[in-house]
Image (tube, rainbow, N blue to C red):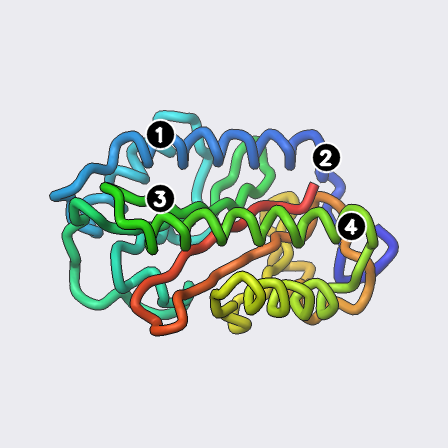
Amino acid sequence: MSHPKEAVGMAFDLSLMRHASEQSWRAVRKMAQTFQPGLRESEASTLAMEILRDLGMERIWHPVHVRFGANTVKTFKQKSEGDPVLGEDDIYFIDIGTVFQGHEGDVGATFTTGSDPGKAACAAAAKALFDDVRGVWAERGLSGPALYDYAAQRAEAMGWVLNLDIQGHRVGDFPHAIHRGGDLGEFEGTPQAGVWVLEIQIADRDGRYGAFHEDVLI
């Protein structure tokens, strides 16, 4: 890596970063198949950990976050309000930070139950915006601040509000924290593949619910 904030350990392997991401997505898909209306948020988090262990996760590097309903507008550092039950026409997201073969996965996605059109649109918009910004990163090599400026403009044009308190971060071979890479949204260089997570969190204009999507830029 050419920039000190992108430093990695001797064990770093891009193919293993890809593997960690793929295993993490496998876990998220299994969770989404398992979570059903009537489940409490706390119960979903417990189930999530069971699924991760079954898939051979070595450890988590950040706590599992499952957010239901109105809690989907909360950031990673904010606590959920109460212990809500997943409803029949609801929205929720899953955010996991896992270690597979010594490398860190960090993925998140939003799902809905039932057929509420606004919530379905919100979930789809978070994924679409993520894909849009990732495409700009791959094609134009924008800096971290430029990527999030672009994301905010696109979110506004799409009719959603981007939460700019969430601006991505470093990952790598465990533990990435020793390299002190900071947030993607503050990184002035061109982000290199395999060491930065792009995070997108949006909400409807009234702040009733939100959606989240993240993955390692590879």
> Distance from label 1 to label 2 (Cα)?
26 Å
Q: Is residue 80 visible?
A: yes
Task: For mark 3, give the secondary structure.
Answer: strand
Q: Nearer the viewer, mark 3 or mark 4?
A: 3
Placement of 15 over or under 218, stated as above or below: above
Q: Position of residue 152 (x, y in %)?
A: 60, 69
> Given contact means CB atoms under 8 Å apart, are the residues at marks 3 and 1 in contact?
no
Q: Nearer the viewer, mark 4 or mark 2?
A: 4
Residue at 32% x, 36% y is: 32
In the image, which disc is placed on residue 188? none
Placement of 53 over or under 135, stated as above or below: above
Answer left or right for 5 relative to 42. Answer: right
Of the residues shown, which amino acid type is indicated by label 1?
Answer: Lys
Among numbered discs 2 and 3, the one appearing first in the sequence: 2
Among numbered discs 1 and 4, the one appearing first in the sequence: 1
Task: For mark 2, give the secondary structure.
Answer: loop
Q: Mark 4 — residue? A: 192
Among numbered discs 1 and 2, the one appearing first in the sequence: 2
Placement of 186 over or under 45, stated as above or below: below
Q: Is residue 96 visible?
A: no
